[in-house]
Image: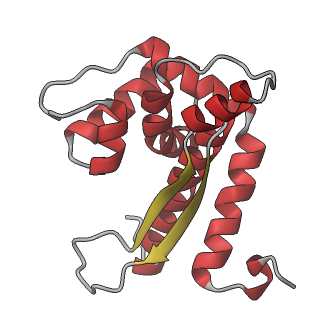
Amino acid sequence: MIEVTEEEIAARELRSAAYHEAGHKVLYEHFGGAGDAIVWRNDSGDPEERAWFGQFRTRVCPGQMRDVALRHGLPIRELPANWRVLSGMAGLLAEAILQLGADDVHALTEDIHYRIAAGEASNSDLAMMGISDIDDFELSFEVVGVATQILREAWGKLREEAEHLMELAIGHPEAEGCG
């Protein structure tokens, strides 16, 4: 029987939280938006809660950036109508890609669907995805496929962001970026 220590569980949860928030950030930036990801230790002491929390805080909406670019005559690609859905699912999808190590859109979609139905998605993620009832929702394989392709193309950037978040969270001074 393999025993997993609390430290190993916490390390796994830190990694998941960092990749989750980095996934939101990378996809949001892909569409021209800007924001900040952060991960912090849960100090509640409740063993039923996750050891690490995270949040992606938007600064500039992709739609706003597109409007500014258009007003100034700058070339900018069309913003897909479902960019919010794609950005909302990016955190769960980044975690699923990390954990499953797969590009199988059906497996990734099923993993995300299961986690949402199990109550593992945050209210903010659900709101961005347009999900108001976790007992009655659908995820499109096509939409998950688009988000998967974007995240896979930016996986190096996503990994760098996640590593940076983990370093900041555990207090490595070299991660501060002001040295």
Q: Position of residue 25 (x, y in %)?
A: 60, 48
- Is 93 situated above or below 81? below
Q: Position of residue 95 (x, y in %)?
A: 50, 46
Give the side of residue 103 with respect to residue 77, left or right: left
Residue 71: quarter of image: top right
Q: Position of residue 15 (x, y in %)?
A: 55, 62
Residue 65: quarter of image: top right
In the image, what residue occupies the spot 48% across and 18% down? 81
In the image, what residue occupies the spot 42% across and 65% down? 2
- Is 159 situated above or below 3? above
Give the side of residue 132 with respect to residue 41, left or right: left
As drawn, which residue projects farthest toward the front?
71
Say which of 37 and 174 sits in front.
37
Residue 80 seen in this snapshot:
yes
In the image, what residue occupies the spot 55% across and 26% down? 147
In the image, what residue occupies the spot 40% across and 25% down? 109
